[in-house]
Amino acid sequence: MFDYPRKPKPATQSPRFKLRIGSGRPIMMDLEAFGWLLVGRKTEKEDDEGLGLDLTPFGGLEKGVSRNHAAFSYMEGGIYIEDLGSTSGTRVNGLPLKPNQKYHLRHNDEIEFGSVRVVVVLN
């Protein structure tokens, strides 16, 4: 079921969650002061300024990850994912997300950015 919340509220604390990419150990992620974290890949000609999660080391280019693919956000006590109009799309538990609409994430949800698979680990 898709949740369609309104405008995100700024986070009072930087919420934390973990992502497991492939078979590796979970990576701790901190959402910025306003509750946003950009997911994508960098190119050789660009730096990764503003990119919170660079999927280039995980085969992002070959697996269809856009430069500005998706964004995590925090609001009303929950973590959300939003596809930013990426070319290859974003899926949660196999279901494609509509661009620019937020989906509330739960523990062990599987996200696919193109074909890079990530598992959400919430405490």
Image (cartoon, rainbow, N blue to C red):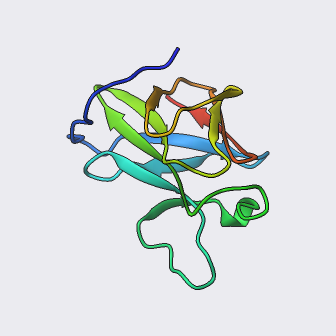
Picture coordinates of residue 106, whole percent (x, y) = 53, 23
Q: Residue at x 26, y 51 (%)?
A: 33
- Indicate left or right for 79 with 43 as reference: left
Occupied quadrant, residue 91: top right
**Which residue is painted at 71% across and 66% down in the image?**
57
**Horizontal and vertical percent for residue 87?**
63, 52
Q: How many marks?
A: 0
Q: Against 58, is 18 above or below? A: above
Q: Residue at x 53, y 81 (%)?
A: 46
Asked whether, in this view, residue 23 is left or right of residue 15, the answer is: right
Q: Quadrant of residue 50?
A: bottom left
Residue sitting farthest toward the bottom: 45
| x, y percent for residue 71 | 46, 47
Furthest toward the top, the residue is 1
32 versus 1 height, above or below: below
Residue that appears at 46% across and 25% down: 104
- Left or right: 65 as drawn, with respect to 4: right
Task: Name the side, left or right, on which 12 lies relative to 23.
Answer: left
- Asked whether 66 or 42 is in front, the reply is 66
Residue 26 is situated, as x and y percent measured from the top left of the image, at 64, 45
